[in-house]
Each structure stands twice: as structure tokens, then as C-alpha cells.
């Protein structure tokens, strides 16, 4: 007996035929806001532990008629509603304009962190067109541009705090973003818009160093005692934050909540909702797990999130299949990421982890994401992991740990570019055929929501 299940991998619909007893693990049902526009307006008027945004702006412009404002936004790895009926960006810009801040004194700053800057086309696809019509500047943060970074000292853990100059010099500092589970910092949003969003590359050496990420509390849905959360919050408070507007989404990426106001308290309220609506109780591990990169998995670098989220479902003999729709300019990642990833594949998880913790190791930006992949391969042998994205060149699979999903596809079509659905189904069929136990007794799971639903062991 089989059943068909549908998953949405980025913008690609994938239909899979699975054994009838497959456990389809999904996030608890969330009710989207019936009127997100009204909710956004109400959140700006009645924020959490902060004055209304309009009042805050009027105070700053009364003290300085030439006050400048910066609105920090996420890059395109997060499905933040910045346009449309649920768009959070224009209501903020509109209140700034109405309160006397002219368009030439507003900057929209993309918190790219160490990622590449977005192209003009990507920005126009992502943002409300009224931003461009009014001539508001949209700028990418560049973590390597020393002239655009201001040094604000060191954190208690020793991170050098270099923050984007446009942000530091603004009189009104507003953060926007999405609060969802995050495999290092517990949840995204809030303080992460500044750290690592606006951080200089040097500031990541401790923040994303091997020791920090080896901490057991640096994981999904954990804030208490999480060193990544604590470090990011310390940096954000040092840089200063006047107001945040964060959202939570349901499984269909519809706005489920709007949380505006104080950096810590508004973010904490959003985090509580995320905990309630993303945690998936599970009673044990599985022999075969199927998951996907979701919206965030625009390249192999980002799909690490989906792999790590699946860890509570895995034992040392499990098999994991991960499909991704890697629409980024480079479907793998930067040259630095590729280099360190290849070391993981060559050395294996144990030796790689020893290497990056060694005193003589020189920190390589983006090694942190490879360290997350190493978490997976500390549990699974690499040949028990199957990965596929249609956009990844065949030659690139030579540096990716795990099996190339194309290996599961019939030889007669190997010269073509198989579709994601075709390869994921072939990989499922392949792994089912080589399970070391009868199919009817095998435990099989589909993580329907990919990296967004977070399995948590009940025992």
C-alpha cells in the first residue's frame, strides 16, 4: 500500500509516493491573520514595551530636524513579507515620511551578513515598489568593506564589533525580519538583523567560531544559555536598536503574527509563538527520513539547516534524503564554503571537527555552516545521506558530502537533467529497496515542512 504526499520545495511542488505507514511530520496548525494590514498598523500604534513608532520618530525629529532613519531588512533567504497585502515595509516607510523624515534621509539596509549582496532585480522582486517610486535608497551591507564599518569595541567573549556605518550613524534604527527556528541561534529575527546581519567579517571569528557552535545549547528553539543568542543580543544592544517589526509565518508562509516594539520583549513574544507552532513531538528515531530545503535552501550552504533539523529523527543506521531547489547564483556557495566543505568530505566528521578546533587552525569565513554539516555526519555515514538539487552541476557533487541523488535515477536518463520530483522519488525507491529490515517494520518519516518544523524527542 502506498500514499501520495506533496511538499513545496521553494517554489517547486514535489509529489512523492510513499509507503502507507510513513509518518508525515508537520508543524502544528497555525491560524494566519485574517487582516494582516490591520495587524501591522495596530502593532506600530501599540507596540510591545515601546512608544508608538510615529511618536518615537516625532521625538527624534523634534530633537534633530535632519534626523536620518535606517530600516534593516533581511536578504532573500528569508520569506519576509515586504510587499503585498501583508507587507511590513511600506507601513514603516509611510510613518517615517508622515512624521517628517524625507525620503532622502531614509536608507533601507539589507542585512546580508557574510552573504553576497542582492542584485537590483532581486531587490525589486522582493520589496514594495513604492519604496523605489519615492526614491528611498536601498543598500546592501558588505561585511568586507572596511570603510563602511565602525568599530564599537569587543564583546565579553572577545568578538570584534564592526557594524555597518549607515546603521551606526542613523538617528532612528528600525529592524525588520522573520522569527523562525534557527539551528544555531535558537530562532531568527530580532538581534540577528544586526549580528550577524550588519557585522563585519572579522566579528564572525568568535561569533561563529568552532567553540561557540560546539556548545550543546547552540541549536533550534533554545534561547536560554545559547551562546549565539547571547552574543548577538550583546552586539545589537551595543549598536543600538530603537524599534523592531518582526513577523511569524504559518506553513504556507502566510503571516501568523506581527510583533513590534522593544528589541528584547517583542522578539521574545515572537519566539514564544514560534516554539508553540514549530516544535513537533516525536517518540523515537526512523530508518528512513525524507526532507527538503524549503524556501531557505537556495544553495547547499543554506540546506544545512534542513539537515540539522532532521537530527533528532536519526540513528547511526538511518538514511536521509534531502532535496533542494537551489535558485541562487551559485547553487553550492562561496569559494570559502566550497573549500572547507571539501575538507569535510575528504577527512570525515571526526577528523574535520578536530581540525577546526586545533590551535593552529586559521578561521575560514563560512566554516560554521560546514561545522553544522559535520553534526549530521557525526551521526550518519556519508553514504547514508542522499542530496539533490536540479541546479547543481554534476562536477560539483565531487565536493559535496553524501550521495548524489542522480545515482538513484535510471541510467537511460542520466545524460539529461532530471527533475527534482523524479530524483527524490527515485532516491526514496532506492533506499526502500535496501533497508536492512522488512519494509512493513521499517520506521519512515517525511518532514513535510523541511527546515521549518523542528522535531523534538518526547523521551
Image: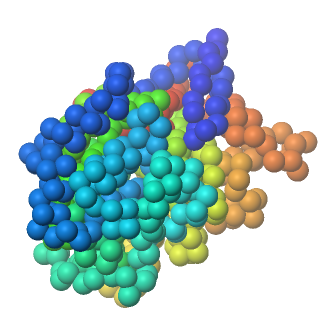
Q: Is residue 334 above or below residue 33?
A: below
The figure's colour scheme reads: rainbow
Residue 287 position within the rendered picture, expressed as x and y whole percent measured from the top left: 50, 33
Q: Which residue is drawn at 58% across and 64% down?
A: 119
Residue 57 position within the rendered picture, expressed as x and y whole percent measured from the top left: 18, 56
Residue 108 position within the rendered picture, expressed as x and y whole percent measured from the top left: 39, 62
Q: Which residue is drawn at 75% across and 40% down?
A: 419
Does residue 197 show up?
no
Q: In this view, does 419 lie above or below 229?
A: above
Quick one: 195 or 105, which is closer to the camera?
105
Q: Assign the N terminus to one quadrant of the image.
A: top right
Residue 111, by quadrant, is bottom left
Quick one: 376 or 158, which is closer to the camera?
158
Residue 247, by quadrant, is top left
Q: Assign the C terminus to one quadrant of the image.
A: top left
Q: Which residue is drawn at 14% across and 50% down?
A: 55
Residue at the outermost top position: 1
* Side of 128 where 339 appears, left or right: right
Residue 225, by quadrant, is bottom left
Residue 274 position within the rendered picture, expressed as x and y whole percent measured from the top left: 28, 37
Q: Which residue is drawn at 65% across and 26% down?
A: 16
Amino acid at each position: 500500500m502506498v500514499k501520495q504526499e506533496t511538499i513545496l520545495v521553494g517554489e517547486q511542488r514535489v509529489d512523492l509516493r510513499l509507503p502507507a505507514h510513513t509518518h508525515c511530520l508537520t508543524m502544528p496548525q497555525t491560524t494566519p491573520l485574517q487582516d494582516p494590514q490591520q495587524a501591522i498598523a495596530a502593532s506600530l500604534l501599540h507596540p510591545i514595551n515601546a512608544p508608538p513608532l510615529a511618536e518615537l520618530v516625532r521625538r527624534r525629529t523634534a530633537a534633530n530636524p535632519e534626523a536620518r532613519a535606517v530600516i534593516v531588512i533581511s536578504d532573500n533567504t528569508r520569506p519576509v513579507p515586504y510587499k503585498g497585502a501583508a507587507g511590513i515595509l511600506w507601513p514603516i516607510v509611510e510613518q517615517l515620511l508622515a512624521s517628517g523624515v524625507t525620503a532622502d534621509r531614509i536608507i533601507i539596509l539589507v542585512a546580508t551578513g557574510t552573504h553576497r549582496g542582492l542584485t537590483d532585480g532581486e531587490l525589486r522582486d522582493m520589496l514594495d515598489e513604492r519604496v523605489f517610486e519615492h526614491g528611498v535608497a536601498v543598500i546592501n551591507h558588505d561585511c568586507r568593506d572596511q570603510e563602511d564599518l565602525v568599530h564599537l569595541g569587543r564583546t565579553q567573549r572577545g568578538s570584534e564589533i564592526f557594524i555597518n556605518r549607515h546603521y551606526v550613524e542613523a538617528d532612528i534604527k528600525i529592524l525588520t525580519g522573520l522569527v523562525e527556528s534557527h539551528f544555531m541561534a535558537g530562532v531568527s529575527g530580532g538581534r540577528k538583523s544586526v549580528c550577524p546581519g550588519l557585522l563585519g567579517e572579522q566579528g564572525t571569528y568568535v561569533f561563529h567560531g568552532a567553540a561557540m557552535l560546539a556548545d550543546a545549547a547552540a541549536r533550534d528553539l533554545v534561547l536560554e544559555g545559547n551562546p549565539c543568542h547571547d552574543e548577538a543580543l550583546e552586539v545589537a544592544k551595543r549598536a543600538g536598536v530603537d524599534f523592531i517589526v518582526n513577523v511569524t509565518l504559518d506553513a504556507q508562509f502566510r503571516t501568523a503574527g506581527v510583533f513590534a516594539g522593544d528589541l528584547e520583549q517583542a522578539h521574545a513574544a515572537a519566539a514564544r509563538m514560534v516554539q508553540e507552532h514549530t516544535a513537533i513531538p516525536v517518540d523515537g528515531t526512523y530508518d528512513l527520513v525524507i526532507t527538503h530545503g524549503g524556501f531557505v535552501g537556495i544553495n547547499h550552504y543554506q540546506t544545512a539547516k534542513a539537515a540539522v533539523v532532521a537530527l533528532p529523527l536519526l540513528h547511526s543506521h538511518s538514511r536521509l534524503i534531502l532535496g533542494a531547489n537551489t535558485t541562487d547564483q551559485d547553487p553550492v556557495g562561496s569559494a570559502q564554503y566550497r573549500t572547507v566543505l571539501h575538507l569535510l568530505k575528504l577527512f570525515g566528521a571526526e577528523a574535520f571537527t578536530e581540525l577546526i578546533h586545533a590551535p593552529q587552525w586559521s578561521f575560514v569565513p563560512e566554516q560554521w555552516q560546514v561545522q553544522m554539516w559535520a553534526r549530521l555526519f557525526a551521526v550518519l555515514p556519508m553514504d547514508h545521506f542522499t542530496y539533490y538539487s536540479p541546479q547543481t552541476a554534476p562536477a560539483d557533487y565531487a565536493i559535496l558530502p553524501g550521495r548524489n541523488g542522480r545515482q538513484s535515477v535510471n541510467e537511460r536518463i542520466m545524460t539529461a537533467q532530471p527533475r527534482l520530483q523524479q530524483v527524490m522519488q527515485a532516491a526514496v525507491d532506492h533506499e526502500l529497496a535496501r533497508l536492512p529490515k522488512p519494509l512493513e517494520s521499517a520506521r519512515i518519516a517525511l518532514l513535510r515542512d523541511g527546515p521549518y518544523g523542528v522535531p523534538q524527542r518526547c523521551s
